[in-house]
Image (tube, coloured by chain):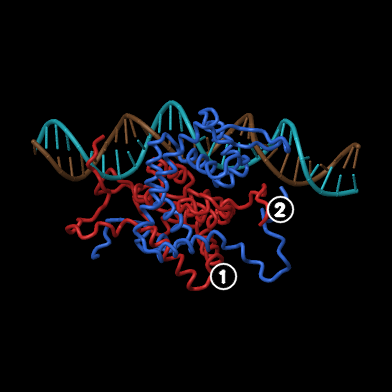
Chain colours: A blue, B red, C cyan, D brown
DNA sequence: AAAATTTATATGAAAAAGAATTCTTTTATG
DNA sequence: CATAAAAGAATTCTTTTTCATATAAATTTT
């Protein structure tokens, strides 16, 4: 490792901000882990957003639009439009909620189910190819780390009374 | 935990695909960690892409367009256009490489530096607010996990001869 | 050294995403 | 109960991204 002349190489392992900033490392890890699979999605004629929606529905069919938004980590107007396209493609179907006519449930169609099936299998295989070579302890490390990050603010509120459950926090702000 | 009737709640902690699929957990962790900060970017009149570029340049000024693309995890045509806008805003400047006239280096302008400075400080503070409450061992777990994932395929190639370094693999395919 | 390739960046038309807002329907309030 | 406020989804208009390809310069072949 003599001359750092050029040879830029991997940004994440080159020292500096990029190699230590948590948000950046997470974005990079996420990208690295998903990259190959996202490319493979073309095999099943699925875009990344379509895949996310179909995979989410495979897991919990009949979600409402906003639940889907939360699950897929997208804002509502975006999935609404994604759903428009998916519906046009016959991959999902909208269904009204009889008890709350504002809500719309989204169902996987048979076509959607068939389309996503091989991708789901591939996703599992891909994950196995990443985790497989690791030791059990390494896998545990990863799981614990992600758990810590995903719940990093849920266990705040020290001893305070009961803490009635924190759902969709802070409705205090006004539009 | 009696009735799983409705009450959808947090998708990531509800069992099923979403709560175990690595790629999903990573995407979610990444989103959770960056979310607040991304909202705060508005304070400095920065979009997420602008922030990424400025932060990268703060770390390594004068990168080429493609290095920036790699660093910011974006495809080349996209940063080119982001750079167009940033240049128009006077945040960065393009500079030709005298030795390879195809290349273009990107420099932070004073204006860019001034604009990103408070955001960089806020980013550090935000990260501290996440990692601070954790124990040293928890922080180590996170670091190890991200390291494992980011380098998950670099230490493959068992005993095979030297393995001349694998840069941008497989140029075997033809267009 | 000409021709063929490859590499680096830019461009253009089409698709997608974003922001703010609207339309309905529910839920809360006085 | 009437009205105000909130919630869920859709829409409109604008900006950004994508995808494929164009340019142009360097590198490799032959």
Q: Label 1: few (<14), some or many (≥20) within 10 Å?
A: few
Q: Name the foreground residue: A6 vs A155.
A: A155
Q: Quadrant of residue B175?
A: top left
Q: Name the foreground residue: A139 vs D29.
A: A139
Q: Check disc 2 and report the residue beneath it.
A: A171
Q: Position of residue A147 (x, y in %)?
A: 52, 61
From the viewer's perspective, is residue A28 above or below residue A43? below
**Pointer 2 chain:** A
Kindly state the secondary structure of the residue where label 2 is placed: loop
Q: Residue at x 46, y 41 (%)?
A: A48
Q: Residue at x 33, y 46 (%)?
A: B104
**Pointer 1 chain:** B
Q: Check disc 1 and report the residue beneath it.
A: B133
> Pointers 1 and 2 in contact (CB under 8 A)?
no
Q: Position of residue A88 (x, y in %)?
A: 53, 27
Q: Position of residue A14 (x, y in %)?
A: 34, 61
């Amino acid at each position: 490792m003599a001359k750092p002349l050029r040879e830029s190489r991997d940004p994440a392992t080159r020292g500096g901000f990029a190699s230590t900033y948590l948000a950046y490392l997470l974005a990079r890890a996420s990208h690295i882990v998903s990259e190959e699979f996202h490319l493979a999605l073309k095999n099943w004629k699925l875009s990344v957003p379509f895949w996310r929606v179909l995979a989410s529905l495979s897991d919990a069919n009949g979600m409402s639009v906003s639940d889907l938004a939360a699950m897929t980590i997208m804002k509502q107007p975006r999935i609404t439009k994604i759903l428009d396209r998916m519906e046009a493609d016959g991959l999902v179907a909208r269904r009204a909620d009889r008890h709350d006519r504002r809500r719309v449930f989204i169902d996987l169609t048979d076509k959607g189910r068939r389309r996503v099936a091989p991708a789901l299998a591939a996703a599992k295989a891909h994950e196995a190819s990443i985790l497989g070579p690791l030791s059990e302890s390494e896998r545990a490390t990863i799981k614990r780390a992600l758990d810590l990050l995903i719940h990093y603010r849920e266990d705040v509120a020290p001893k305070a009374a009961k803490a009635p459950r924190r759902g969709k926090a802070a409705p205090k702000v006004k539009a």
